[in-house]
């Protein structure tokens, strides 16, 4: 097949086309210029699932010379290589039984894939672009991996491409996308997750080129919110955010340009499937916005009632999984759901907190923030985030055990600025100090100048309580001896 410059492999059909076995075909090539096995050869090996590719070098005399053999490797968890290339000095020096060897290799593949199928989770490959250095990209990919785990996916590989800016067509470039596709095929991954927001055209191009399920960071966060939402308002807010995100991407649909209805008597260009989908999306958007507007008015009415009775409002804000719900439970003796997961709390939860001097405040736990929080979510959750806007005091909870605590704090500051509450009185709370050494505690205190505590154990909460009382009440200074810690905590 082919000539001295290129080969053409014909359509192989469904010959032994199962994912857990090889084709039963071997591709034997002769190379005249000593170039050996090429990247294209290895791509064919993987895509076509050939038993092996063998390249035989031709010597000047015309006789066969050295040999290179390439074959696929089973997808094991601790193995990065997809294939192996072996060299032999002479084609006649082949002393192994190839059939026995390839059957044994196929058995290893079957065993590895059986383990994958029994895991029961969709397998995903993460892809990021390092535009500001690989260290920052690795941290971002690590956070994306936590998001994927929260969504119930199993991450099997991570790919980082260094570029000055994302590729306008495929985000990472054609070559790197092909490599990622090969990794997905080898590891039997069904999902590609990109660490960034894909444009509608990028999403369409990547989905067409790979035939895989494609998600970006925004859509993954939206899916997590959809999983975690439990109340009617929370579900409506998530659906609103999803509709706003998906509306510009409706053109991805394969039936987008089909004409369904005409004018009078069936004449005229009619209305395309894309136009119908957009109109239905607009109608659903308007209905949800009206329902959320009514729920927002009810929430505003409850806030006005609280203000009439003179109860100060304190909102707990912070990066997701910083321990906000645990802190609320500890300070108010509540049992709000608090899990070691991203976005465990979506709906705001308000509880009364009583000080020893018969003073009460309303303490509200809000949705956690994250780096590059999708604008669709900020807009959809605006009625919920009004609890932050109306607060008299903000408790900014920081996970002191995180290596990126400073970057997380900056992300929260950015969202608060977008909400217009950057000038609201704020107390920094360094949480999870029970997991730090004494030296690390000192370093965290120097970095943030906040109140160190542990919401899990209650350590350090007394000074925090006094600071809250002092901020909210003019005459709120009190002696530690006057406070009954059991009553407060």
Image (cartoon, rainbow, N blue to C red):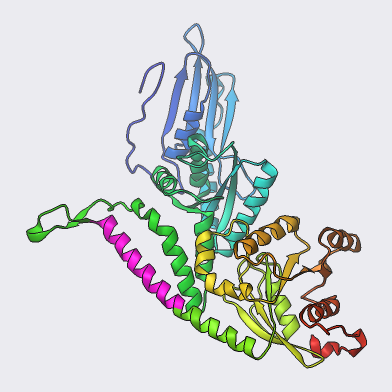
Q: Is residue 276 magenta?
A: yes
Residue 123: x %, y % from top left: 52, 55
Q: Is residue 303 above or below residue 98?
A: below
Residue 212: x %, y % from top left: 43, 50
Query: Quadrant location of residue 350?
Result: bottom right
- Going by the image, does 120 lie left or right of 431? left
- State whether the magenta stretch is mostly helix, strand or loop: helix
Query: Quadrant location of residue 397?
Result: bottom right
Q: Nearer the viewer, residue 8 or 399?
A: 399
Residue 462: x %, y % from top left: 85, 80
Tell me the quadrant of the picture where the C terminus can be found: bottom right
Q: Residue at x 47, y 29 (%)?
A: 40
Provide the residue span drawn in magenta. Answer: 272-293
- Going by the image, does 14 lie left or right of 463? left
Q: Is residue 190 visible?
A: no
Q: Is residue 86 above or below residue 142?
A: above
Tell me the quadrant of the picture where the N terminus can be found: top left
Residue 30: x %, y % from top left: 45, 19
């Amino acid at each position: 097949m082919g000539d001295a410059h290129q080969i053409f492999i014909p359509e192989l059909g469904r010959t032994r086309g199962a994912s857990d076995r090889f084709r039963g075909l071997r591709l034997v090539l002769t190379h005249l210029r000593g170039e050996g096995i090429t990247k294209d050869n290895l791509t064919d090996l993987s895509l076509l699932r050939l038993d092996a590719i063998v390249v035989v070098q031709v010597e000047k005399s015309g006789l066969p010379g050295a040999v290179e053999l390439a074959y696929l490797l089973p997808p094991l968890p601790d193995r990065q290589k997809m294939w192996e290339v072996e060299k032999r000095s002479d084609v006649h020096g082949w002393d192994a039984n190839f059939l026995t060897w390839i059957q044994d290799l196929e058995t290893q593949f079957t065993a590895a894939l059986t383990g994958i199928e029994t895991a029961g989770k969709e397998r995903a490959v993460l892809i990021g672009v390092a535009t500001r250095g690989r260290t920052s990209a690795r941290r971002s990919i690590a956070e994306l991996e936590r998001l994927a785990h929260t969504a119930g996916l199993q991450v099997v590989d991570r790919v980082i491409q260094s570029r000055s800016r994302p590729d306008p067509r495929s985000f990472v470039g054609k070559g790197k996308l092909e490599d990622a596709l090969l990794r997905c095929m080898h590891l039997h991954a069904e999902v590609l997750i990109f660490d960034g927001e894909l444009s509608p055209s990028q999403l369409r191009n990547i989905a067409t080129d790979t035939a895989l399920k494609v998600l970006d960071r925004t859509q993954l966060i939206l899916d997590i919110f959809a999983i975690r939402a439990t109340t009617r308002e929370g579900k409506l807010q998530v659906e609103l955010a999803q509709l706003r995100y998906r509306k510009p991407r409706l053109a991805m649909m394969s039936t987008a340009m089909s004409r369904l209805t005409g004018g009078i008597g069936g004449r005229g260009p009619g209305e395309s499937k894309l136009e119908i989908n957009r109109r239905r999306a607009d109608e659903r958007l308007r209905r949800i916005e009206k329902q959320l507007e009514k729920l927002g008015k009810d929430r505003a009415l409850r806030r006005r009632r609280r203000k009439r009775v003179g109860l100060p409002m304190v909102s707990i804000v912070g990066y997701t999984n910083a321990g906000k719900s645990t802190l609320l439970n500890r300070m108010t003796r509540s049992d709000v759901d608090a899990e070691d997961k991203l976005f465990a709390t979506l709906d705001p939860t308000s509880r009364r907190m009583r000080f020893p001097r018969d003073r009460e405040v309303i303490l509200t736990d809000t949705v956690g923030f994250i780096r590059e929080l999708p604008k669709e979510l900020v807009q959809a959750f605006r009625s919920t985030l009004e609890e932050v806007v109306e607060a008299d005091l903000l408790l900014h909870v920081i996970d002191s055990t995180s290596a990126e605590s400073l970057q997380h704090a900056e992300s929260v500051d950015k969202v608060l600025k977008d909400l217009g509450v950057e000038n609201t009185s704020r107390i920094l709370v360094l949480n999870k100090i029970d997991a730090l050494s004494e030296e690390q505690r000192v370093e965290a205190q120097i970095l943030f100048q906040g109140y160190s505590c542990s919401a899990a154990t209650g350590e350090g909460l007394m000074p925090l309580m006094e600071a809250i009382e002092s901020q909210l009440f003019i005459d709120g200074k009190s002696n530690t001896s006057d406070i009954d810690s059991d009553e407060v905590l």
